Image (cartoon, coloured by chain):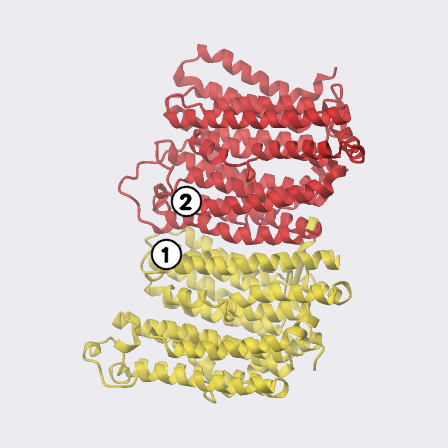
Amino acid sequence: MDFGAVWPEIILSGVGMVLVLLDPFVAAARRRALGYLGIAGMVAAGVATYLEPRTGEVVLAGMVVLDPFSLFFRLLFLAAAVLVALFSFDFMEARGQDVAEFTALLCFATTGAMVMAISWDVVSLYVGLELLSISSYILAAFLRDERRSHEAGLKYLLNGALASAVLLFGLSLVYGLTGTTSIPALGGLLAARLGHPYAGIVWIAVGLVLAALAFKIAAAPFHLWAPDAYEGAPTPVTGYLMVVAETAGFAALLRLVSTGMGPLSAEWGVWLAGLAILTMTVGNVTALWQRNIKRMLAYSSVAQVGYILAGVAVATRGGVGSTLFYLVSYLFTTLGCFAVVVALSVRGQGDQIGDYAGLGRRRPWLAGLLTLFMASYVGIPATAGFMGKLGLIGAAVHGNMSWLAVGIAVNSAISIGYYWSVARTMWIDPVPASAGPITQSAGAGLSLALSAVGVVLLGLVPQMFFYLSQWASAGVIR
Amino acid sequence: MGTGGFPLLTLLISAPALGAVLVGLLPAGAKRAIRGVATAALAVPVLILAGMLAGFRYGAPGLQFVQRVDWIPAWHIQYFLGIDGLSLVMLLLSAVIGVVAAIASYGIDQRVKEYFVWFLLLQTGVLGVFCAQDLILFVFFFDIVLVPMYFLIAIWGGPRREYAALKFLIYTFTGSVLMLVAFLAIYFLTGARSFAIPELAALIPQSIGHGAQLLLFAVIFIGFAIKLPMVPFHTWLPDAHVEAPTPISVVLAAVLLKIGGYGLLRIAEPLLPAAAHTFAPLIGAMGVVNIVYAALAAMSQHDFKKLVAYSSVSHMGFVLLGIAVATPLGIAGAIFVMVSHGLISAMLFLMVGVFYDRTHTRELSRLGGMYRTLPLAGTILAFAALGNLGLPALSGFIGEFFTLAGVFGTFRVLAFWTVVGLVLVAAFNLILMQRVVMGPVRPEWKELAPVSVRELVTLVPLMCGILLLGTVPAVLVNVINTPAAQIVARLGGG
């Protein structure tokens, strides 16, 4: 058994366990040091990832594949975990929470996401999904003294468990039809069953898998849990779930459906395209009415998932490449937003959009950067979002789904309504009398700066990232 | 087409952006320094363009001062700048109006630093639009313009500024993303491996069917028609113009609307000439609708600024008409109208500001008798209104004459309605003069301050330009003849 292939996962989960073991022996005031130890572990896992082979060899009894796709997603999850950890310590300490325990859970959840991305077998993929999900349920309910956090954790747990069950049921049908759990073998065997009297079961199985994954990425009409869970969860956790949990869902979707069920893409491509249009429209239109920024960002993430789904639905190599590029853009934009939102939330403000009134005069840098991230969400040039949408629209047009491209275009225009209301509030409304001080530690500032640099780099010189995402998408469509 | 040489156009575009960085470094309290730096940064493009005028080969077809490097090779997107006569006149107009509007902005006293940062970024976007020869680079600059414009209206505008600014943003952005879809469709349908306008123009006829060309043209046309604006996509304009502060109304009318006309001439017509030919009668009819409808709307306004805003919509009808005619005369007329309207509308909006600053009203029924209370201002307004009306010897006449002459040759029926439109245009300008400058002196306006030197500094250059173009139109015609002929050659006419 070649466990060397999963060094990054071993390191990350190992660091998580070390944190849990050390935690009782460190005074509460010093636990931030343990948090930084966790970040060091994430960076070390990143280095280990970089040293892994990436030529596509299948190891660990067919469970794991080491291809560019694996490398890409491992680094993506680790980068997101580092950015989230950096801006969450202030928030957790201000609420008297245990930073070490929190960081350990981040490590476990991220390990699960990474396992999902490197899986070459349905079983390992499911194990990764459950590790991510269970850690996420705890993270969502992490604020022990707040009812809303409990509620969020419970809702996330109930819906997530249901989705996992549906996925498992779909996968068991797939296994019954094909007799294999190996992802690359599924598609051909499923396609061969289409002629038999099993055709109906094939579509039920594919439909259940798609529905379960749509639950996980919060695509409409399976998104109803997301606004409640995202609103109630601790703010840094909301950012983490929106980025890592949803991106992991996309990794699973690309592996299981794009690769595993590739031969059936003519059918599920159209289903996913319909889902994409519905998701982006529902997300954008509902977001227009929100006054709570976490809820607004939750619906915004539903809309963004719709855009990303468009890239998967096209089922071409260009589509997958654009999907991966957009995921990077989505990561920096979302975590940048949350770095600002968390900075305001440390002292209990920042949940209502009204809390941002006059931020342009109080903290011009925070307001300026949040404006940048909003512009990126809309897709205004010189930001990552523009290049991301350019890629997705291009892929849709190229894949003969121009109506999908028009859907993205129209939705981008609708989304100005709510993204820009935040910018308007910050720069035009007067500072409220109740405005309290805003504190941001150096680590949180670093996280914000890194996200901003990411958004601008992707917006101005995206070349390297376009190549990277094309390279990583090479094996997905076979 | 050379690709080397001194990056003059990059310098031109980036000068205002560098100015924005400099202004950003100044303390917010140093208002005089901020205004000085901003004006200097806006004057740099004017100086560069003055130098370019000397080195420009007016008779030569094709692009000059070309800069072309790969920007995003994965998508075959290039940083491709270049100008022809059409770009040159638009750049000159934008650069001059930029300085004029900056001087007119000295009266802004709130959040001066932010104001000029946004203003300078706006100018970079505008100059970039007129230089870009790659479709994606064009969209890049086209959209960059929107954000500063939003804030300039939404922060420093009138009572309904936030609504007006958002409406402007959503309308224009909708047009631009739909255009982006069309551009990508062209890219894939031609298989061009390039977004450069000249390459695409050469490939489209043999690679895209007529039906698809019609659809693509319609989408791109609507994108620019929103910007122009064309009735029925014009409703954002009266709102935005009325709510924007005076200098921003000036830029909006004089320069931003021109991006619509410029885009039609630079992108829609040369890329899809067959579709342009098919749609020409419709475009011409829409042009006449614009002229007549907006002139009627202008006549019924009670608000000085709204009247001027509808006057802009009306004049953009002549641009559409000239484009529809598609003869060298018609195209040259369309470009001439754009330049002339840039100068005249800027003057009119400045005059709205002159009167508003003193009376704090734009109600036409409350103004009057200004010839006697403010003789100089009254005279200048009369000059601008007469220019707007199309009085010979002023620039408005020439462009409208060219367009009308073209229309007589091609669309006789439209010519009749255009003449009706001209009468209506004259009517609302005369109504404007009658309401504001004629009539008995109003007692409440007896003690108004005379026109200041700063106001004159912004108005006099525009007056000189209007007179020059009206009396010696050749200075402009010589520059735009070659690009007009090239566009017509693409359209297959002559």
Residue B167 to residue A122: above or below: below
Are dots 2 and 1 in contact, CB under 8 Å? no
Say which mark, if any, is on residue A367.
2
Residue A353: give x, y in percent of width and height.
Answer: 38, 42
Residue drawn at (67%, 51%), measured in percent from left and top? Answer: A401
Q: Quadrant of the N terminus of chain A?
A: top right
Q: Residue at x 59, y 39 (%)?
A: A328
Query: To which residue does mark 1 refer?
Result: B155
Tell me residue B374's x, y (percent). Answer: 27, 81
Q: Looking at the image, which is closer to me, A318 or B100? A: A318
Figure quadrant of residue B156: bottom left
Q: Quadrant of residue A246?
A: top right
Residue A282 percent coordinates (x, y):
52, 45
Give the chain letter for yellow: B
Tell me: residue A284, above or below residue B453: above
Q: Which chain is red?
A: A
Q: Can residue B49 be seen? A: no
| Chain of the residue under the numbered disc 1 shown in the image | B
Q: Secondary structure at mark 1?
A: helix
For this rendering, which residue is in front, A47 or A211? Answer: A211
Pointers 2 and 1 within a single chain: no
Residue drawn at x 44%, y 26% is A89
Name the amino acid type tagged 1.
Ile
Q: Quadrant of the C terminus of chain A?
A: top right
